[in-house]
Amino acid sequence: MPRKHRTPEIKKAVGLRLRAARLAVGLEQKDACKAVAVGKSTWSMWETGERLADPYAMMRFASRFGITLDWVYLGNAAGLPADVRKLVLFHSASLPVGV
């Protein structure tokens, strides 16, 4: 994604959806880090929106846990498995409108 499209609002929204996805699949941050081979500080920066989540790491996360890149980056839950979608939407209920 070009840097001009990495607004703070987008990074925050992606981070909140990533957190919701992690919680939906029952992982603690340390387990998610291990699963995609990144450090805890990196994952934390992604979830807080300090940095945009790396697409290659998100592909590993997606293939391992059934989370779609459409959910993480666009907020589109349609492609998620029904059980995961229900939990992701539950955990993302606190997302700001339009994020």
Image (cartoon, rainbow, N blue to C red):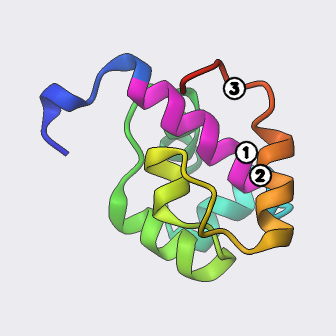
Label 1, label 3: how many angstroms apart (C-alpha)?
A: 9 Å
State the residue position of label 1: 20
Placement of 89 over or under 51, stated as above or below: below
> Which mark identifies residue 95?
3
Q: Quadrant of residue 67?
A: bottom right
* Lower position in the chain sequence, tag 3 or tag 2: 2
Q: Is residue 36 magenta?
A: no
Numbered disc 1: secondary structure: helix
* x then y, percent, for residue 17: 62, 42
Q: Nearer the viewer, residue 21 or 99?
A: 99
Residue 28 seen anywhere in this rendered image of the structure = no
Residue 86 seen anywhere in this rendered image of the structure = yes
- Left or right of 79 in this view: 21: right
Would you call the spot at circle 2 few (<14 residues within 10 Å), some (14-19), or many (20 or more)?
Answer: many
State the residue position of label 2: 88
Determine whether label 1 and label 3 are within 8 Å by CB: yes
Q: Amino acid at mark 3?
A: Leu
Would you call the spot at circle 3 few (<14 residues within 10 Å), some (14-19), or many (20 or more)?
Answer: some
Q: Residue at x 59, y 47 (%)?
A: 40
Q: Residue at x 52, y 51 (%)?
A: 72
Which corner quadrant holds the N terminus? Answer: top left
**Of the residues tagged 1 and 3, which is closer to the observer?**
3
